[in-house]
Amino acid sequence: MDVRRRVGLNVKRYRRAKGWSQEGLAFEAKLHRTYVSGVERGVRNPTVTVLEGIAVALGVPSSKLLDELEEPRSSA
């Protein structure tokens, strides 16, 4: 899986676990909502400084944003 997609899925997972909207996370991380959206969609390539800010806002270690996720398997 592409690292940007992996980071985006992790950000989305932790954000939803906190019950936050993208706007709420953006406020806490001092980012624009559209930037957070781009990160979650895997179209933005955030710097390590931005990733750290997102991780701090979410209350997770920044390394958790890089963790591998198991992609759902399609039942064909």
Image (tube, grey):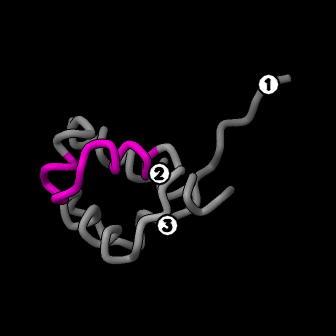
Name the residue: 68% across, 56% down: 1
In terms of depth relative to the viewer, which is nearer, 41 or 59?
A: 41
Dividing the picture into quarters, in which one does residue 49 lie?
A: bottom left
| Earlier-in-chain disc, 2 versus 3 | 2
User: Residue placed at 35% from the left, 68% from the top?
Assistant: 51
Instruction: Give the percent coordinates (x, y) of residue 47.
Output: 40, 73
Give the residue drawn at x 20%, y 39%: 23
Q: Which residue is mark 3?
A: 66
Residue nearer the viewer, 45 or 69: 45
Kind of element beneath mark 3: helix
Q: In what element is the residue under mark 1?
A: loop
Badge 3 crowding class, 10 Å Cα cut-off, few under 14, some 14 to 19, many 20 or more, is some
Spatial distance from mark 1 to mark 3, Cα to Cα? 27 Å
Q: CA distance from mark 1 to mark 2?
A: 24 Å
Q: Which mark is residue 62?
A: none
Name the residue type under label 1. Ser
**Residue of label 2:** 8
* Dominant secondary-structure state across the stretch colored magenta: helix
Circle nearer the viewer, 2 or 3: 2
Residue 15, position as x, y percentages in the image: 29, 45
- Name the mark on residue 75: 1
Above or below, 35 against 72 in this view is: below
Q: What's the residue type where badge 3 is placed?
A: Leu
What's the magenta region? 25-40
